[in-house]
Amino acid sequence: MNRSNEMVKVIRQQRRLGKNILVAAVVIWFFFMILMPVFGIIREAFREGLDVFIAALTAPESIHSFVLTLWITMATVVINTVFGIILAITLVKQRFRGKLFVEGIVDLPFAVSPVVAGFMFILLFGPRGWLGSWFEAGGIKIVYALPGMLIATLFVTLPFVAREIIPVLKEFGLQQEESAYVLGASKWQTFWKVTLPSVKWGLAYGITLTIARSIGEFGAVLVVSGSIINKTQTATLHIHQQFTDYNYVGAFSAAIILAVASFIILTTMQRIYRQKGVD
Amino acid sequence: MGIVVGDISKKFGDFVAVDNVSFEVKAGELVALLGPSGSGKSTILRIIAGLETPDSGEIYLTGNDVTSLATQKRRVGFVFQHYALFKHMNVEKNIAFGLEIQKQKKPVIQKRVAELISLVKLNGYENHYPDQLSGGQRQRVALARALATEPRVLLLDEPFGALDAKVRSNLAHWLREFHDNFNITSVFVTHDQNEAIEISDKIVLINRGRVEQYGSARDVYEHPESKFVASFIGQVNVLEAVVRDGRINIKGADATFEPRDGEKLQTGDVVLLVRPEDIELVATPVSNSLPFTIKTIHYRGSHYEINCEVGDILVNVIENKNNFIRQQWSVAQNVFLSFKDYRIFTAEGGHEKVREKLKELGYIE
Amino acid sequence: MNKPGFLKSLSWGGDLTLRSLSFFYVGLLIILPIAAITLEALRGGLGSLWRNILTPQAIYAIKLTFLTAFFMVVLNVITGTATAWVLVRYRFPLKNLMNALIDLPFAIPTVVTGIMLVALYGPKSILGGFLNKQGIEVVFDKPGIILALMYVSFPFVVRAVQPVLQEMDLDMEEAAKTLGASSFTIFRRIVVPTIIPAILTGAALSFSRAIGEFGSIAIISGNIPFKTQVASVYIYGELESYNQQGALGLSVALLFCSFLILVFLNRLQVWSRKHEQIQ
């Protein structure tokens, strides 16, 4: 080979070196920033040995908090899925004044700080609140009790399902439905057999996001619930309680459970997201 | 002093894209790199531009060895198949880009851009953005942009590929005129043989990374040097035959004819390539004609395509409109074909081998 | 399609039901709470609201919130863009794994994030101890806040820029090369202008998240007034002290900022859609 080709090889090697440095820098930074902390809690949770770890996890307030988180999450998923679908269908298929406003408003929970969200619901449903005062009169506690926590969680997770379904419905829903009507299907039949299946992956993704957020919700629920041990403490509140009481093993062990749950949710999210893209 | 491509080779992994390709483009010529999809012609063009580096071989532009020179320094003008206009810049800024890189002064840039815009007849569109222009207009902006920096050579990669037929033809001729005005050494890649024949000075036929033939359009069409070339440019009938006692026997036709004036042929298997327009159709036998029957007739506007058969041989004949009207050919009519011109290739390895080769190239099923 | 009169009114009724339910859902969960807090804040008059915001502690909290958020956004834009670039343009081992893990901060509860960072950078950890000796306090000081904000907002910029880089026409960059542009010039004049809208979107989302972030900061910062107390924590403190008035000022200020950011994001979307018309 002659001189020209030799020079070409040198230039190529130089370019490759630059690339490799950049890639290495990014990967190292990522590993350090995002992954190391995860390893950190594993070490801390088991610092005092396996039995202490298990004892912390099986303590009554710990178990209660996980169960509470589970209930709230399930209820949130059911309610927000149903209403999310209703909202999506209304926004995509109907025309009415103020539609754009409603569409814009759906994104609002993303922008509101959790503490402020909790505060809003205290004002609304608290014992002296606009609506709260009526419930109070009827002897029903909303704030500092389960209903309030549920409402707060509904708020922060509201956009997920709707936002995932709306674009899919806009693109495919209408044409498919019209074919169904032409073939004689009723509105209800069309809904179950055509509309719902067409958005199933978007729906699944939205539900997964809802679950992740419900489990992880902290600020709003903290404010609304009063964080009463064994009564209104979710898993995240429990972690916070343990930490501020200097029960580090208690805090870290519960944190690990949630972190594991998050990983599982994350991988599910990824898999569903890919399926969504395929369709 | 134009472009010299010196024995270039390039592999992508195990795939040989370019295989010892050499050719020359004389200063001021407009040359077409013609070949089927995947033949490596675009790769060769990109190597000339420096967008790919060859595994071996050299490139010379206006006499200088540029093989190890980066694209930025080669001063080539390149027009991409999908124009590659800068979407976030308007027409003016697109064209000015190269000049700004050269750090030319503002007034100089403005003047040149204005000149080019008039040249490509896009006056009034200076502030338009690419997404507001039609395909043909975008193509012209791409051309103006490439020429702004006064490059040594102009390279175009399937410049008309993304346009529809009428626009394509107009633009192709416009490009030729344009080229004649400026005499800039140019190479364009195309898979459309009509384009190549219509506007280029020379054609380089590329197949599977190799140069099949290189010459003027007439040379390549009238004197194809291989079966590939003959079948790629223009339509051609492929017939197997045997030469015996100095006469050509078409296999399966049970008919023989004498070769052209005094051509002496070796006894053995051969392959005949006959262009549809080189076959004469007559109602009564003449010397050296073969009996066929008309199978189907297709109207093509300016001419008719007539499929004739005998045994299981099918031959395509082109008959112009006036002849057809005069002769009143009809389906199932018995006719006689006489081959006015053809190419003969010896079938090395026998007919089977040849058939395989032709099947590989996609010219027979 | 001509439906018999009775069926017509039935479907009309169905539509109305859907719309009513949607209004109820969005009204109860979003419009009412926002109205409640806004009106409550205005009840005492703009004057007292302003006074609440202007207490020294509140002012410090706001400044700290915006400064840390801004700082984090700058860091996030740089690292996020570099990460997106590396993920889209290069191939390297473990790339798919890294791509999947980018979303991890979205899946992990914010308290768990706070806990992880404490485990990794707390005074008792190797890293934390080392940094402390250099005079850098992470936990219970400002670096910790920025760290936490970076973690929870990291995916925003990456995921905003990634698809744009992916869709980019490499042709444009090659064309620039033939016109003589160096790699740096190509990046500056071709790539950056194309991804700026995406970067701005990611930045705005990060910023919005940052000013409202609570969980992770509540754990890692120690919530020390005039040192590490951000707006959300200040609000929480006021609520815990039954000082709703104090909390109102900052809450409304934060809401107003969020609203501005939402409008900005919306305008950005519209602008970029206008420029992305026919290919």
Image (cartoon, rainbow, N blue to C red):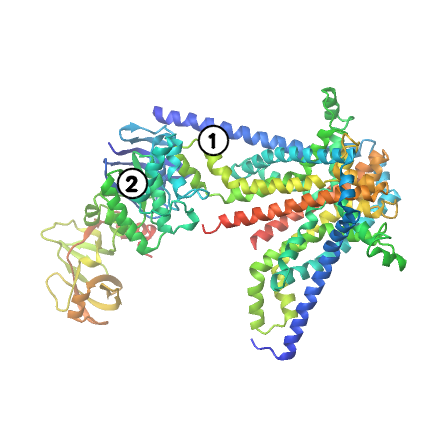
Tell me where residue C261 sits by quadrant. top right
The reply to whether the C-beta atoms of the residues labelled 1 and 2 are less than 8 Å apart is no
Depth check, mark 1 against mark 2: the one in front is: 1
Image quarter where the C terminus of chain B lies is: bottom left
The mark total stands at: 2
Tell me where residue B312 sits by quadrant. bottom left
Q: Position of residue B186 (x, y in %)?
A: 28, 39
What amino acid does circle 1 point to? Phe
Work out whether residue B139 or residue B322 is closer to the camera in this orientation and state it.
B139
Q: Position of residue C246 (x, y in %)?
A: 81, 41
Q: Helix, strand, or loop for circle 2?
A: strand
Q: Where is residue C214 in the image (x, y as percent from the top left)?
A: 75, 40
Horizontal relation, residue A85 to residue B89: left or right:
right
Q: Helix, strand, or loop for circle 1?
A: helix
Image quarter where the N terminus of chain B lies is: top left
Horizontal relation, residue C13 to residue B111: left or right:
right
What amino acid does circle 2 point to? Val
Image height check: is A97 above or below B36?
A: below
CA neighbours of label 1 inside 10 A, class few (<14), some (14 to 19), many (20+): few
Work out whether residue C265 or residue A248 is closer to the camera in this orientation and state it.
C265
Horizontal relation, residue B50 to residue A224: left or right:
left
Image height check: is B118 above or below C15?
A: above
Image height check: is A233 above or below B47?
A: below
Check disc 2 and report the residue beneath it: B187
Chain letter, disc 2 residue: B
Q: Is residue B218 visible?
A: yes
Horizontal relation, residue B181 to residue B289: left or right:
right
Q: Residue at x 65, y 35 (%)?
A: C70
Q: Position of residue A23 (x, y in %)?
A: 56, 32
Check disc 1 and report the residue beneath it: C184
Chain letter, disc 1 residue: C
